[in-house]
Image (cartoon, helix red, strand yellow):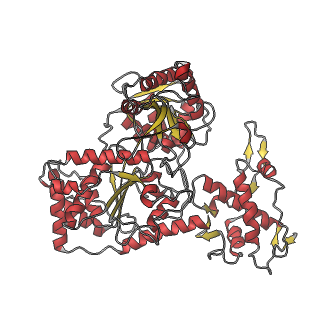
Amino acid sequence: MLSVNVKQHTDFKAPYSSVTHAKNHLYAIESIDYFLAVQLTPVLAMRFDENRPLSNENIAEIFHLLIALSQALRSGHTCLPLNHVATRFLFRFADKQGVITHQGYHFTSITALIELLTQCNNLASGELPIVLSKENLYLRRYYCFERQVIEYLHSVNRQQTALSASKLKIIENTLAQLFVESHQGTQAVNTIDWQEVAVANALTKHFSIIAGGPGTGKTYTVTKLLAALVMLAQQIPLKIALTAPTGKAAQRLSESINKALSGFSESISADILAKIPTKAQTLHRLLGVIPHSPNFKHHQQNKLSVDVLLIDEVSMVDLPMMARVIRALPEGCRVILLGDAQQLPSVAAGSLLSDLAPISTAVYSKENATYLMQVTGSESLCSHKTQFVDHVTYLTHSRRFSSEGGIGQLAAQVINGQAELSWQLINQQVDEKASELVRCSYQHIQSIFQQAVEYYRQVMRSESVEQAFSVLADFRILTAMRVGPLGVDDINDTIDERLRAEVPAQQLSGALYQGKPIMITTNDYTLGLYNGDIGIVWPNELRQLVVFFENEEGGFSQYIPSRLPAFDKVYAMTIHKTQGSEFTNVVMVLPERAENQLLSRELVYTGITRAKSHLTLVTNKESWFNAIEAKVTRFSGIKLID
C-alpha cells in the first residue's frame, strides 16, 4: 500500500481532478461539498502523527467524509453520525434500468473511521474546523452552536429550586383566578385542563415549551401565562419581549395576543392586561441587525434588556439563530417557546423544536407532576423516573379543526403516517366534508389555475390596499418545490401571464401592475425588508405604482420598486415559505413524480394546516403514499432522553 506523509507533501491532490470529475462519480453532490473537502482535507492531514503516515486510501476516506458532512449540513443536519456512513455506499446511483451512472464511494467500518479520525491531533480542541464528538462529525461552528444550547439547558435546570408552601399557595390562587372553570368544578370529571397545566409548568421554570398543533390555543395559553407572571411579580415591572422568526409570524402573534387580551377584559384586571405587550418583533430586530454584517448588536458582551422572552413559531428557528439568542440572554431571563413540533423543521440547519420536545405526550418527573397536580387540581399526570421532559407541555385539543372535520382528521392521519386512511379520506364522495376537503387530479390542473386567476383578480379589483391584503390572505397555492413542472416558478408564471393579459398596456409598469403580489427573496437590513416578506403593487396618492408592505405598527410602508431588494411574484409559494401563515382557502400541489426527494409527511402536514376552511389537494396515489410514508429525520447531538 502506497503511503503519503502529508506533512512533507505540500502539493495535496484531491481524489478527483475537478469538481466535474467528482460530480460524475458522486451522485447529488454540489460544488460547495467538493471545495470544502478540497480545502479541509490537507488541513486535517497535516495534523496526523508523522510516525503513522497516511495512505492514499486514508486521504480518500477523509475527503469523502468531508463531502458527506457538507451534504448533511445542506440537508439541515447539524452533524454527520459516523454510523450513518460506515460500511455503506454513499453517492451511488442507478437509473431505472439498473445501470449504475454514479459509482459513489464505499466507507469502511465505524471502528476504522473512528481510529482514522482520532489519529488527527487536536481534533477535539479549538484548533481545527472539524470536531468528532460521540461518534458524530461536526464543522466546529455547528458543534459550538449545539454546545451553547445544551449548556444553556443544563444551566437553567440547575436553577430549579424547591417551592415553599406559601409560594405554592400563591401560584394556586393565581391559577384559580385565571382558570375559573377548572377550579369551580364546571369542567368534566377527570378532564385535565392542559392550558392550565402549561401555565403552571412554565411559572416555575426559566425555560419552557408550549407545543401543539394549529388551533390548540398556544397563544391564548401563553397570554394567560404572561398575565400570571405579571400578577406574581406584583409591583415589579417586567420587561416582556414578544418575538417570532419572520415578519409575518410576528404580525400574526401580535394579532393573536391582541385578540386574547380582548377576550380576557372581563375576567382579568385591566391593570394586569395593560402590562402585557401587544407588539411582536422578529428575532433579527430583537437582537439588533448590523447592516452588511452576520453579527448582531446584542451578544454575550451586550446582553438584551428583557425579563421574559417569548418566541413563537419556534419550529422555524434554526440552530445558529437560537445559539445567538442564548448568547444575548441576561441572567435570570425567562424563555418561553411556542410551536408545533410536527411541522417542518427550519430551512437551515437544526430541528430545535423536535430536539427540545422529543416525546409527543407530556411526561414529567415525579416531583414536577406532584407540583402540577397540587396547584392545578389535576388528578393524574404521567410521570417517569428517567424518560421525562419537565419543560414541555403539549396542547392537543384543536379549536380550529373539529374532530369530525376533514382538514383536522387529515392532518392527524398524515402526521401519524396513516397513508391508506388519509387516502380514503381525501377520495370520499361528496358528503358533509366536501366543503373542507377536495382532491383534484393532475388532468384538471388548468381548472385550479383558473380558480386562482379568479381569486387574484379580486385582489386587483380591491377598493383599497387594505382590502387587497385582506383578499390576498383568503387564498394561496402551495407547492413542495420551487423549480420544475408544477413548481412555484412554473405556477407563478402561468397565473401572472393570464392576469397581465387582462391589464391595459398603459396601466403596466414593466412587469408590474396593480394588485400583483410579490415576495422579497433577499434580506435588506437598511430598508427593514426580509426574505419572505410579502407586498402588493398598488398606486400611491400620486397614482404611481409602488409596493406596499404591512409593517409592525399595524399600518403600511411603501417603496418604489427600484429601491427594493430582489423579489419575485407570489401567487404560489413553497410550503416551507408559508410556515407562520394561514389562509382561508389553500390549494396544495404535490409533485406528480412519486420519487421526489422533497416529499415527507411533515411537509404535507405543514401544508394541510395552513388551511383554515378549505383545502384542495392535487396529487395521485403514488405520490401521496410516498409522502406520508417518508418521515423527516435530522441528525443532531442534542439528546434530552435516551
- Of residue 468 and residue 113, the one placed in the foreground of this image is 468
- Does residue 542 lie above or below 3 as drawn? above
Q: Residue at x 75, y 55 (%)?
A: 105
- Of residue 347 and residue 536, the one placed in the foreground of this image is 536
Most distant residue in the right direction: 2
Asked if residue 185 lies left or right of residue 335, the reply is: left
Residue 485 pos. (x, y %): 62, 30
- Does residue 411 lie above or below 103 as drawn? above
Q: Quadrant of the N terminus?
A: bottom right
Which image quadrant is residue 10 in? bottom right
Most distant residue in the bottom direction: 51
Residue 418 pos. (x, y %): 46, 40
Most distant residue in the front direction: 542
Number of dots carrying numbers: 0
Residue 187 pos. (x, y %): 17, 48
- Of residue 190 and residue 352, the one placed in the foreground of this image is 352
- Does residue 428 lie above or below 132 as drawn? above
Q: Residue at x 64, y 63 (%)?
A: 82
Residue 636 pos. (x, y %): 54, 61
- Of residue 556 and residue 303, the one placed in the foreground of this image is 556
Q: Residue at x 42, y 44 (%)?
A: 248
Residue 434 showing in the rendered view: yes
Residue 478 showing in the rendered view: no
Asked if residue 598 lies left or right of residue 478, the reply is: right
